[in-house]
Each structure stands twice: as structure tokens, then as C-alpha cells.
Image: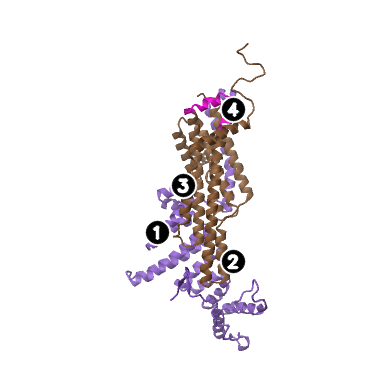
Chain colours: A brown, B purple
Amino acid sequence: MADSEPANQKPAGRTALISVGRIWTIAASTFTQLVRMKTFYFLLAFAVLLVAAGNLNILFSAVEQLSMIKKVSFGTMDLFAWLFAIVATALLIPRDLEDRTLYTILSKPVLRIEYLLGKLIGVLVVILLSLVTMFVIFSALLHIRTIDFLHTEVAILEQAGRSQEMIQAEAEAIIAQGLRKEMWVALWAIFLKSAVVASVTIFLSTIASSSLFTIIISTIIFLVGHASQMMIDFWKDQFVDNIVVKMLAGLFRIIVPDYQIFSFYEGIILGEKVLPHLVWSMTGMSLFYVGVFLLLGLLVFFDKEF
Amino acid sequence: MRAILEKYPRWIPIVAVILVFGLIRTPIEKSLRSQLIETHLLQPPPARTTLGALKQSSLMGMLGGLRSMVAVYLTLKAYEHFGVMEWDEVESTYDLITSLEPREEFHWVHRIWHRGINAVASVEVNDDLTPAERQRRFDLYSTQAIEIGEAALEQLPNSVKIREQMAEVYREKLRDYCGAAKMYGEMKDLPGAMQYSTRFYGYFLAKCPGNEQKAYDHLYGLYVETMSNLDRKGERGFVDHRAPTLIITLKELEEKLDIPISQRIPDPHPDEGLKRRNRPTGRLPGGVGIP
């Protein structure tokens, strides 16, 4: 019986409970893998873009220029987050296959869900860290520009002999465009969107045989997901009484994720009030998405032979 | 789970999960979407005409969730058109910008300003146009500016700046003092309105035929309010409405309305009343001196 397993020991490669430790190990190695791909070089480009946008003094007012800095910054953060979520996630499983790391991992007592979850968390940690770094760069620039504009504008208005009331109003308008704590919520909204995008991509990458396919399909789903409401409205307008179109529109809504609702950061940077219950609901919705797409990924991946 | 999955083709549970998930999330998403739009955190999808007018790159950007970035890019494009006085392009670009970001106040203010002040002023001095064409464009642009302002107020009903810009078009270009008075009248009670808006309401109401008595009552009320609070002069919150224009307008109205001598306001002290306050220091922004 020397070659048989002891009765109380599970066969190699199988383990009963999900281990946070194993997930974290895979996430950490994914993080290292992505950092080695020189991901953070993007931050340099971001800083340059921001400084350029911050010094583009062709617009009419201080308020408008500060607003532009915010829009360019958050737009770039959003672009980076979803693009990185798609590309990095699509690359990970094929790269592990190519490097044969996948065989080493899966031959150990690691659950497939642990592998998928570890990969996803690794990608999300890189995204979160990049977003926070970008936010810190943005905050510093916005703060400097706000102070700068405040001094300049107040000095100009005082010199022009404007009333104290007018100076106060201008100063308040400039301060309103400056840093607000709600901007962290805007950052969180971008992160939530990228988490959903990454989970959809990880599901697709378990089906696909190449990264290119995953990237293309994920991008298409992303774009369609953003335009889904517009498309549904259009169909309903065009074919008011057509029951078939109505059913197809319903099916389309059921299948395609609505990515547009995750763009609520745009309202926050325009200065709209943030309602905590909506932020919690959006967080819950994102977790729901991540959970379901991980489950779908697992359905494909759990007995996949490599 | 393995037994179930081995029994059926793999696509069946996958499709089932997608459908069940879709059925659960669709009503939740619908409710979240309407709440986000209601609180203005999310912009409703732009009109089809806007989408049709967007160039391919801007459209892709917008579909990629970069609505604000597209708006910034279009603002720069509008500035470019403004630089070479292509007024119709300025207007069409701002039309797109305000469709993309209808809640951004300064887009609307600039749109009204470009159409109602800049384009109109440019037409006024354009010697290449015949007088008839000049007049036609003057009427068209200034009327369009007011229509834009009305559309803007539907989006931002409490905006002081939009009303201020509309008042400028009424006042400076259309010479419609009743329209200007209406704007200042709406403005004066809004949060963030400047103190002068309540006086301006009276001044332009005085120039609006048939409203002289109303204007007199309003301006006289401001005068009396200031006089009764004179002991608070210098304190925070004290507003001195005794501006030279207010005194002059009141005196003109007293004459026009034939107010009894005993009820008329006294002539201002020669050193105080008509003295111009907040006189400019004789320097322009940036320290440039006025010759």
C-alpha cells in the first residue's frame, strides 16, 4: 500500500475549503506579474497630461479651467481603469498557460475558484493602487491651481475696484471647483466599473483561446453596454407597437450589462450631491456582477483540461 | 455540482445563469438608473440628433463613457471657431456640448454670450453685409440667444448666471428693458444673486412702459429699507441701496408719477449722494494702466 494515499488524506489537487491565504498568494504573484509589465509607467503619462491640461490657459475663466482639469483627470482615470481591466485580465490566463505557470499552480491543492479570484484580485489591486496614485497627483495639481486662481482672480477684481460681494462670489465659485471629499466617491465609482469589466473579461478569457479574442469581445461588450439604453430607447421609438422588437429589446437588456450606470462619477465631478444609499447600492450591484461572472468563469474553468 | 454539470452540456447552465442574473438585475438597474438621473449623478442618454452630429471619434469617446472628455474636446474646438469668428460653428459645437453636459452652467452661459453678444456684435460691424442682411442676422442671433437661455433655464431653473447673461442680451442688444427687468426680477430672489440685481430690477422696470408705479414702489422700498437700517452701517449684512442710479431713477419716477412733494425723497448731499462708489483704480487686470 506504499503507493496509495492514507484514508484520512484528500487526493493531491483537491481541497475542500477556499483558502484566503492561497487566494492572496495568487493575487500577490499577479500583482508582481503586472508590475513587471511596466504598468505604472502610465502614471508618468497621466502626470504629463494633467500638467498640460492644467496650464492650458485658453479658456475664459478660472472656474472653467478648474472644471477642465477635473474632467480630463477623471476621464483619463476612467479610460485607464476600464482599458487596463480588459487588457490585463485578458492577458493573464493565456500568459500563465504560455509560461506553464498554470500547470504548476493547478497541480497543487489550489481550487480553480481560488485561481480565478486570485487573478481578479491581483488585477483590481493594481487598478486601485494606480487610481489612488493618479488621484493624489490630480489632487495636488488641482489644489495648487485653485490657490493660484484664487490669488490671481481676487487681486484682479480688487484692482478693478469690484465690490466685496462680487469678489466673495468669484472666490466661492473657484473654491466650489476645487477639491471636495466627494471626489473619493467618484474614484470609487470608476473602480467599481473596472471591477465589473474585469470580471466579465475573466469569464470571457476562460472560454477564449486567445487574448486578442478576449480583448476584442470585451471591448465590444463594453461599448455596447454603454450604449445599451440608447439602443433600447431607439428601437422602442422606431417600432412602437412591434411585440417582437419589444421582446428582443428585453432580451438584449437581460444579456448585456448596463455599464453606463457606473459612469455616475461624471455627475459628482460636476458638483452634484452624492447620496450615500446610491453609492452603497452601486457597490452592491458591482459585487453582484463580480460574483455572477466569477461563477460563470468557474462553470467553464472548473474541469477544463490544459 | 460536478454531477449536474457532467449530465448537461456546459452552455446550458451558463445561459441559465446569464438569464436568471439578467432577470434579477434588470429591474434593480432600471430603478438605480432612474434614481441616478433624478439626482443628476447620471446624464440621460443624449438626443439622437446629438449623436448624429458627433464625429466618429467623439461618438466612440462618448460610447466609451468619456462624455466629459468629449465635452472638453468640443469646448476647445468651439474656442478655435470663436478665434476665427465662425459663429455658426461656434453655435453648433456648443449645441453638442450642452447636449452632452446639460447641467454644466458655464456651457450655457458661454453659448448665450457667443450667440447673443459676440455674434451679434460681429454682425453689427461687418461692412461686407448689406444693411438688410445685417439686420436679419442681428434679429436672428439675438432671438436665438434668448431661446437658448430659455432652454438653459429648463435644465437649471435656479441659475443666476444664465439669467444675468440673458439680461445682458436683452439690455445691450435687443434694448428690451421689460425682458431685462423680468430676468433681474427672477434673479433677485435666487440664492447666490448679487445685491445689485434687486436694484437693476427696479431700473429696468422703470424703463418698461406701464410699469413705472411698480418700479417706483420697488425702488422706494429699497431706499426706505436702507434709511431705516442706517444705524447698522458698516455691519455685516447691511446693504446700502442708495446708489446714484437709484436716486436718479427715483427722482425721475417721482416727476413722472407726480408724487406729492412731501413724499419725495430728499436731494442727496452733494458730497455723498451721487458720488461714484467702487471707482476703478485706473488700472486694468494684470497691472496695465488706463491712459
The x and y percentages for residue B32 are 59, 47
Q: Is residue B148 above or below residue A208?
A: below
Residue type (three-letter) at the residue carrying disc 1? Glu
Q: Is disc 2 placed on a helix, strand or loop?
A: loop
Q: Which residue is mark 2?
A: B190
Q: Which of A173 and B250 lies nearest the eye of the viewer?
A: A173
The x and y percentages for residue A118 are 57, 33
Q: How many marks?
A: 4
Q: CA distance from mark 4 to mark 1?
A: 58 Å
The x and y percentages for residue A210 are 45, 31
Q: Which residue is mark 3?
A: A45
Q: CA distance from mark 3 to mark 2?
A: 44 Å
Q: Earlier in the sequence, mark 4 or mark 3?
A: 3
Q: Is residue B123 magenta?
A: no
Q: CA distance from mark 3 to mark 1?
A: 26 Å
Q: CA distance from mark 4 to mark 3?
A: 38 Å
Q: Chain of mark 1?
A: B
Residue type (three-letter) at the residue carrying disc 4? Leu
State whether discs 4 and 2 lie on one chain: no
Q: Which residue is mark 4?
A: A111
Labelled pair 3, 1 in contact (Cβ < 8 Å): no
